[in-house]
Amino acid sequence: RCLEAGLGSCIGHNFLSNLQYLPCFFSEIGVLYWHLDPKKSESEEELAKIRKDRGYNYMDYLDICPGKLANFEEKLKNFFTEHMHADEEIRYCLEGGGYFDVRDKDDKWVRIWIKEGDMIVLPAGIYHRFTLDAANHVKLMRLFLGEPVWTAHNRPQEDHPVRQEYVKRLTDDNAGLALAAH
């Protein structure tokens, strides 16, 4: 997958220089990734297996684009505010695309471009943000462990126990950060 390093703090879609392939990057920071084809039935079986293996027992859909998401500009601005969650953030891209910007071990931004078929799991405690790509539309399946909780804790959150746990795992030679994915 293509990742882009060195984003600074700009919002927008025009960050297409300095693309790098960093396959080991995901495991270094605890991000999980799969590529499925939402148009093929085999992917439904694989998605069901992932959901069962990881305990994702609730799902809903989020269609992010003008005209489909109430208060579109305000919500997109909120998604782009750097934050973390006390739970994993699990997103399966069904249509369109967008960027998850995540912090690496050196606290630098790395951009992960997700497109149709990409499924990503951001670990609890990782600082991140999200914006749309140039198509200005994405339809996502959101998956949750148990009842859906989506509470963003804007940075700084260094005293939050989940953030402290995440940082500890980062500094402990990645002990227990990423589980198998492909």
Image (tube, rainbow, N blue to C red):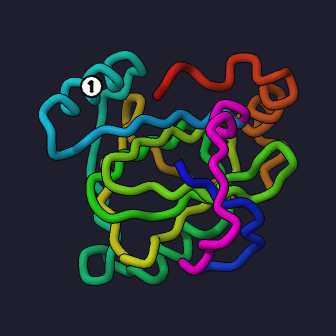
Q: What residue is drawn where x is 75% and y is 17%?
A: 175
- Where 117 falls versus 162 (above or below)? below
Quickly name the residue at label 1.
46
- Where 32 falls versus 139 (above or below)? above
Q: Nearer the viewer, residue 161 or 92?
A: 92
- Secondary structure beneath dot 1 equals helix
- Count of all numbered marks drawn on residues in the image: 1
For residue 78, side relative to residue 30 (left or right): left
Tell me, yes or no, whether the highlighted magenta stretch contains residue 112. Answer: no
Q: Nearer the viewer, residue 93 or 163?
A: 93
The percent coordinates of residue 134 (x first, y second) are 43, 78
Q: What residue is drawn where x is 70% and y is 37%?
A: 29
The percent coordinates of residue 33 (x first, y second) are 49, 36
Q: Quadrant of residue 57?
A: top left
For residue 50, side relative to residue 32 (left or right): left
For residue 59, side relative to residue 53 (left or right): left
The percent coordinates of residue 110 (x first, y second) are 69, 56
The percent coordinates of residue 92 (x first, y second) are 36, 45
- Where 154 falls versus 178 (above or below)? below
Tell me, yes or no, whether the highlighted magenta stretch contains residue 21. Answer: yes
Bin the neighbour count of mark 1 within 10 Å (Cα to Cα): few under 14, some 14-19, many 20 and up: some
Q: What residue is drawn where x is 81% and y is 57%?
A: 108
- Where 71 falls versus 153 (above or below)? below
Residue that protrudes farthest toward the left in the picture: 41
Q: Which residues are magenta?
A: 13-28
Q: What residue is drawn where x is 29% and y is 60%?
A: 139
Q: Nearer the viewer, residue 81 or 93?
A: 93
Q: Amino acid at mark 1?
A: Glu
